[in-house]
Amino acid sequence: MEQRLKIWMAALVVSMGLYACGGGSGGSLTTVATIPIAISGGAYAQGTVTGFGSVIIDGVTLDDSSASFKVEQDPSATTTGTSNDIKLGMKVESDQGSDDKIKTLTALPEVYGKISELQAGIGFKLAGQTVKVSVDVAAPTVFEGASVLADLLVGDIVEVHGSRDATGAIVASRIERKDPASAVMVRVVGAVSALDNIAKTLVLSGLTVNFSSAKLRPEGVLLENGQLIAAWSDQAVSTSGVMIAKAVKVKKPQAGDGLKMQIGGLIAGLDSKAVSFKIGEVLVDASKARFESGVLAELANGKAVRVGGVWQTDKLVATGVKFVKDSTDAKVELKGSLTDFISLASFKVRGALVDASTAKIEGGTADNLANGVLVKLEGSIASGVVQAKTLKIETSTGTSSKPDLTTRTFPGEIKDYVVSSGKFALSGISQTMQLSDKTVYINAGSDKAASKTDFANGKKVTIRGEFVADILQVREVKFTATKAEPVRLNGVVSGVSSSQFKLNAVTIFWSSTTPIEGGCQQVW
């Protein structure tokens, strides 16, 4: 079933598409009672990014074709971004219109700053917060800028997304090691304790926050113990463990009565009698909810769940609660163009590192993969890398006569070339392609001119063009060089020594004679 954020109703029983399949075990589902509340247009979602085509939040595909994208660092001045700023494993919130299309999608880091202490095999500390790498196969940690926890060092700047467990530690859904030259910044999201309105201080877990000079948002808000806030500073945490906050935002759901909602994360503040709990700043009333992949008695602080329902007064009235339990809940879907391609075992899609060495390939073969090729894949995360189970090379976009102006790339060996029509195919790909008088010919790795007369069956090429109806109209033909072309990778290095380093989980060897552009060699 296509999982889109949809609402279906029967006798005014509201259920998110996420729970439309029903489920549970042994007839232990609770009865879903009628909710006497009008349903408003629009919707709100908060959870973890689990894929892209359009963005996928906790397994639910949402249309981001007309969305604006933001990244919240300084909570008083959210930064405008692009779709490329939204990455796998990020915690995000989305505001949808009545047509179910996302209007605004915002990334919400849980903590950002310098690592102060490493805890081998477990996690690390920064800005007074404890961060744990997830050991839950249903909700694994995604890494970027480092391959595994062991690649991180004290002093590294990291951005962490995730949820708090029952001990107050952040269980990371994403850990991104940033450029060490990044501007100084500290951000912490947490619950207020030890509030002192005279001294203008509060505590977020192990971090003392001085908010005497901070912008408070919303304007005029009064801070209280127990509130969930985001605190930000452009100064490093002092040696005594104090953050001089420049902005503090009280986190409150921006919801009106009847707003459809979905939210995912770890349970906190469970009230077993009232069957209510919190996920982040959202209070959830699950007293009349249907449970999937578990039963009511399994609710516990620290458990991962996904909730769908409707906002009423000051809480989310849940109609469905799904327990996140096994690897099927960790399914990742990615659609995008390949980048940083080395081999079938190492490339990126939408910034996520992928290993497709054991994947079933559809629409072509491994020889038809290269930078720029559009693919759709499914898999799961292991050791911070997406392990693809299936990979489909996307070919024709349909039979419409309206041109698809998106440039597409296909490498392969020429076959079935008909000179009179200019039509041909590539080995492994069932797709008709066609040359024209406007096609440009290039010899890769050579200054020697190329032309249409060089085009022949059996030659290896990379084709670029656009679809018109069901035919790829070729704009460029690049003949493959006899020598292997250089591999180009982008990212943040780790594990640097005088002879090697890691980039995108690939070990790269270097020496004192390796040319360095934009820096020097003394980096270890």
Image (cartoon, grey):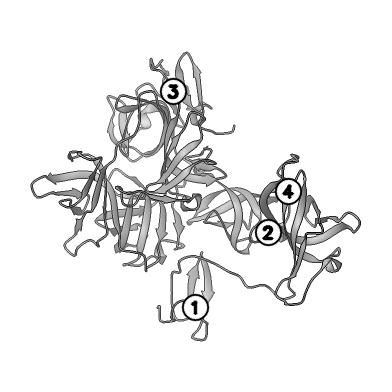
The three-letter amino acid code for the residue at tag 3 is Ser
| Residue at the extreme top | 11
**Relative side of 175 to 192, left or right:** right
Q: Nearer the viewer, residue 270 or 222?
A: 222
Q: Nearer the viewer, mark 2 or mark 3?
A: 2
Name the front one of labels 2 and 4.
Answer: 4
In the rendered structure, which disc, 1 or 4, sits on the residue that comes first in sequence?
A: 4
Find the distance from the CA under tag 2 to the CA under tag 3.
Answer: 48 Å
84 relative to 425 in the view: left or right: left
SS label for mark 1:
loop
Give the residue pinned by disc 3.
28
Residue at 42 percent across and 19 percent down: it is 32
Q: CA distance from mark 4 to mark 3?
A: 52 Å
Please name the residue that numbered disc 2 is placed on. 369
Q: Report the amino acid beneath label 1.
A: Glu
The quadrant in which the N terminus is found is top right
Quadrant in which residue 443 is drawn: bottom right
Choose mark 3 or mark 1, whichever is in front.
1
Q: Position of residue 362 (x, y in %)?
A: 71, 49
Residue 343 screen position, x and y as percent:
63, 64
Residue at the outermost left position: 198
Q: Residues within 10 Å of mark 2 (few under 14, many from 20)?
A: many
Earlier-in-chain disc, 4 versus 3: 3
| Numbered circle sitting on residue 517 | 1
In space, the residues marked 2 and 4 are separated at their CA atoms by 19 Å
* Label 1 CA crowd tier, 10 Å (few <14, some 14–19, many 20+): few
Residue indicated by mark 4: 467
- Asked whether the beta carbons under mark 4 and mark 3 sit within 8 Å of each other, the answer is no
**In front: 68, or 52?**
68
Q: Is residue 306 visible?
A: no
Secondary element under disc 3, as helix, strand or loop, is loop
